[in-house]
Amino acid sequence: MKTRHLFAAALAASLGLNSAFAGGEGWTQDFETAKKQAAEEKKDLLIDFTGSDWCPPCKALTAQVLSKEEFRTLTKDKFVLVELDFPRQEENVKKQSDADRERNQKLLEQYGVEGFPTLILTDAGGKPYAYTGFQPGGPEEYVKHLDELRTKGETMKGSLEKAEKSEGVEKAKALVSALGDLPDMAVTNFYPTVVSQIKEADPKDETGYAKKLSEKAQMAEFEAGLQEFGAKQDMEGALGHVDKALESGKFSGENKQKALLMKVSILANMGKFDDSLKFLEEAKAAAPDSEIAGQLDGFKAQLEQAKAGAAGGAEKAPKEEEKEETEK
């Protein structure tokens, strides 16, 4: 038995395979092979985006549900299980190949994942129909939750088919409703035909859907550019990038608020607290009813505290220099 296990481990190593899954037995990281298996076995995919060595709810979900034999037993006829891990500890990062890390990051962006853990239910081709995360209650309750989401996926499929038989703006509205709360990025990447149908059925954009997708795409492009300046620690460049985006007039509402808050953060990092506080008020006014707006008073207090601390340090420095001169 021991020899067989050692041989299996050596074989996996020689093939460059990484079998160290947080979910344990029954999980794979090979996304393309998982899709082929799902198609052959007429199953869906359950994709777990996780941070196995740093994310507390990820660890809890794995320990309480995903690693349990009961979970695998209850899902084996329904899903092919895929684990896409985003570790942070150096020894765990090194266990992944560059290709694996690049693929995981690409899938993270394609599916519009914004937090961990995120579990996505998809058809055999990888087209998503439901998103979820940590749920208490153990394997049996979690599988019941997944079954409810599978039913939701069937309803969504039927609603899309029914909507396609409508015409004009009513068709567009029905298609938008059928897509439900799927992330816009996932809709753009996996439902391009539906997006085209919405635009064709609603050329005047009475639903506002085309505008929303356009703004999302612009925000994604804006954030990608900002990350490049951040990687170089170029604060002046980042500030210019934000100003250019705001001056273009492309952003409004919550997107304008997010861009302004980027400017607030950059100015604070540069120690320009008066300017930062000024633009914080402008950000709040851009979308006063947003979820973020309700948190900005607390952020303002933090900025004012940081400003006071910086001012105190500036006053203290000359006094320390004067004391040193006296001692000399």
Image (spheres, grey):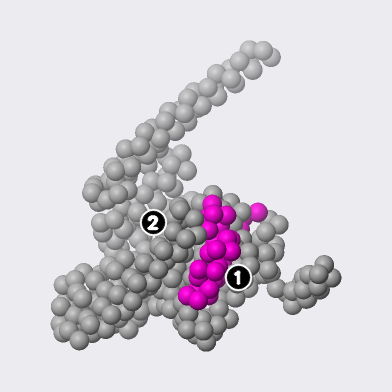
Say whether residue 18 is left or right of residue 214: right
Vertical relation: 241 (above or below) 274? below
The amino acid marked with disc number 1 is Gly
**What residue range appears in magenta?**
60-89
Say whether residue 66 is left or right of residue 272: right
Q: Residue 169's x, y, as percent?
A: 15, 78
Residue lying at the far top in this picture: please name it.
326
Q: Quadrant of residue 86?
A: bottom right
Say whether residue 304 is left or right of residue 53: left
Q: Residue 133's x, y, as percent?
A: 44, 59
Residue sitting at x 55%, y 68%: 72
Vertical relation: 33 (above or below) 144? below
- Is residue 82 one of those drawn in magenta? yes
Front-most of 164 and 262? 164
Q: Residue 85's x, y, as percent?
A: 58, 63
Number of callouts in the render?
Answer: 2
Residue holding disc 1: 26
Front-most of 283 and 3? 3
Residue holding disc 2: 242
Residue sitting at x 63%, y 64%: 24
Residue lying at the far right in this picture: please name it.
3
The amino acid marked with disc number 2 is Val
Q: Secondary structure at mark 2?
A: helix
**Quadrant including the C terminus:** top right
Number of the label disc, if any, that sits on residue 112: none
Q: Is residue 221 visible?
A: no
Q: Is residue 52 visible?
A: yes
Vertical relation: 271 (above or below) 207? above
Q: Secondary structure at mark 1?
A: loop
The Cα–Cα distance between marks 2 and 1, rounded to whole angstroms, is: 46 Å
